Amino acid sequence: MAFPANERKGLTAWIFCCCWWFFVIGASAGSHKGDAWHYGAKGTAEWAELRMGVKNQCGGKYQSPIDIKTDETTYNASLGLLRYSNYNKHLRNAYVVNNGHTVVVAPKGNISATVTGRGLPGVYRFNQFHFHWGADDTIGTEHHIDGEAHAMEMHLVHTNEKYTTAEEAYRHSDGLLVIGVLFAVSRQDNRALNSVVHSLDLMLKQRTNRVKLSKAISLADLLPGNPRQAYFYRGSLTTPPCAEAVTWAVLKRQGKISETQLNAFRHLEVESAGKGNHEPLVNNFRPTMPLHGRHVYRNFLIIPDYPKGSVKANQRLGTPK
């Protein structure tokens, strides 16, 4: 992706390991040495001071998430539309993990699902997806759109295939692609999420923090309509060590989730039941971060919504005056 030079400078990350990589190989998010971290106003404000077993970039200039102000975004025709390959294949051997910070769904072993785009610097292979949510429907997403948050956000994490190892990918600003999907509350269940929700119910009943995904799901079904349109910017992982090695693609369209399904996430605890900590796992989102001169691009045109019958509306539709 063609970002200005001042946005590329200083974006490399020599991270040996990241939180999400531990999810993929089946280990705990706390497997690396370093200070424990948590959410909340005080918790996120102190992330930059954490001593980590890897380089901590939480105080960097290119941090995520951000507030996407749509009227300040720039259309970039060279980006092209996102292209998904093998996203329609089902995850048949995946695990759902409550790591105390989020719910992660990760396949056991690599799968062939990839994302490409004319403006993306490579082919990105899917690794895992996870969620962020709030205690009520007015909060939960990490990214905001024009200052507004929604109930939940899903992140699909991918690694650039041109790097032979994950460790190598972390050393480059184009190492990771994360697709962000914001969810709004719907009266009806999102059928694509039923398997995840059922797995969360099993997790609570079995008093464990790791279960096998109850039913195979398709990554394509998790995406909202027209998932090829997105907002793009250079940023970071949204949890410590906040590696600045991420190209973000926040989808234009929102997904849907019911109140019942949201409550399945809200009933989880920071640690699995029976281990002495019954703190609810909610509000697991980082506040929006300053842009520090970064630009947000989009690969779609914004058509003004003029009143029906107006001169400009007729011109847009090709209707004679």
Image (tube, helix red, strand yellow):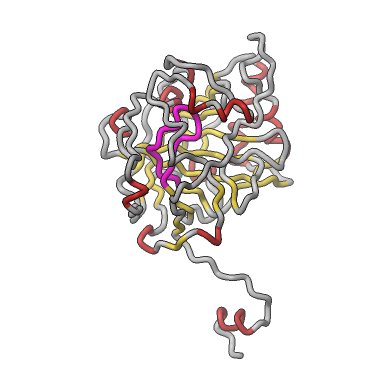
Answer whether residue 96 is magenta in the image. no
Horizontal and vertical percent position of residue 272: 62, 16
Answer whether residue 241 is magenta in the image. yes
Is residue 35 placed above or below 129 in the rendered structure? above
Is residue 127 placed above or below 279 in the rendered structure? below
Quadrant that contains the C terminus: bottom right
Report which quarter residue 318 is drawn in.
bottom right
Q: Which residues are magenta?
A: 234-248
Marker count (numbered):
0
Let me know if residue 177 appears in the view.
yes
Horizontal and vertical percent position of residue 79: 38, 58
Q: Residue at x 46, y 33 (%)?
A: 59
Horizontal and vertical percent position of residue 251: 51, 51
Q: Is residue 111 left or right of residue 162?
A: right
Nearest to the observer: residue 284 or residue 166? 284
Q: Residue at x 48, y 47 (%)?
A: 291
Let me know if residue 214 appears in the view.
no
Q: Residue at x 50, y 48 (%)?
A: 250
Q: Is residue 108 left or right of residue 191?
A: left
Horizontal and vertical percent position of residue 129: 49, 34
Q: Residue at x 56, y 48 (%)?
A: 67
Nearest to the observer: residue 139 or residue 268? 139
Task: Label the magenta part by its dominant secondary structure.
Answer: loop
Q: Which residue reaches farthest bottom?
A: 321
Report which quarter residue 128 is drawn in.
top left
Nearest to the observer: residue 31 or residue 317? 31
